[in-house]
Image (spheres, helix red, strand yellow):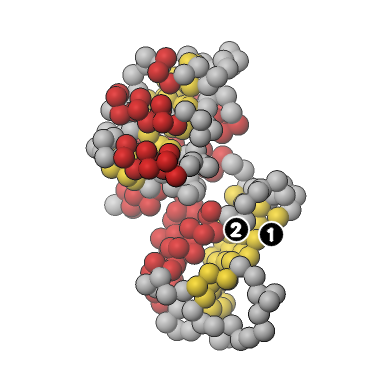
Amino acid sequence: MVRIIMRGCNGKMGQSISGIVAADPETEMVAGIDLRDEGRNPYPVFPKVWDCDVEADCLIDFASPMDVEDMLDYCIEKNLPCVLCTTGLSQSQLAKVEEASKKVAILKSANMSLGINLLLKMLKDAASVLAPAGFDIEIVEKHHNLKLDAPSGTALALADSINEELNNEYEYVYDRSSRRQKRPQKEIGISAVRGGTIVGDHDVIFAGEDEVITFSHSAYSKAVFGKGAVQAAKFLAGKGPGFYNMGDVIEGILS
């Protein structure tokens, strides 16, 4: 049984993960960290991470960047592996994460979805075969109209996975409106669509002569990220110091 502490337990993702853990016979939510305790959780909730005296095997963080440094210090002190899902960390906070990973197991990925991370692996194989054969590569991502950044971090992670396989020789192109030229072969086009309540769609298109191969991933709810976080907690429990990502979780499942 993997015992989990949830930082940000009363947020939308925290509540989603609490439900996923409750339905999983291999995991147990033993405590939560949140500024408010609304009395709706079957586990104790503490306002600050240092207030928590409950033993656990892993901490999942889906809160704001505030107090991330304290949380990392807590994980180091308790030798508690951490699945770090919080986004928007500053450069100094990212440096702190890197330093903490030398003392305790930390897992951080651009996207916590198991499907996306399997796709990252598949794209490397596809790129190694299709790019040398002259296939053009395009990525189209779609998200809800409240999303602030474009392109998405996941779209960039998909592009990076492909480009790493191709010796980082490909240029990323986000807008062709100012261009009046034939498309160069060594580029990856990345387009962003914003509208409605789309949770997250990503299409990776390999367009060759007389044939097109498309890899697609659609997230229908944010629960997919919670499921990935719980899977990551199972993987990370008992691991020694290191900086892990969801690719390591996929490798663990496949091995």
Which type of secondary structure does the marked residue at label 2 adopt? loop
Residue visible at 54% across and 83% down in the picture: 184
* Neighbours of disc 2 within 10 Å: few (<14), some (14-19), many (20+): many
Residue visible at 62% across and 56% down in the picture: 150
Q: Residue 28 lies in what quarter of the image?
A: top left
Q: Residue 56 lies in what quarter of the image?
A: top left
Number of numbered discs visible in the structure rendering: 2
Which type of secondary structure does the marked residue at label 1 adopt? strand
- The amino acid type found where label 2 is placed reads Pro
User: Foreground residue, 28 or 104?
Assistant: 104
Q: Position of residue 169 (x, y in %)?
A: 42, 75
Q: Which mark is residue 193?
A: 1
* Residue annotated with mark 2: 151
Measure the C-alpha gap from mark 2 to mark 1. Answer: 9 Å
The answer to whether residue 215 is left or right of residue 53 is right
Q: Position of residue 78 (x, y in %)?
A: 30, 24
42 to 241, vertically: above or below? above
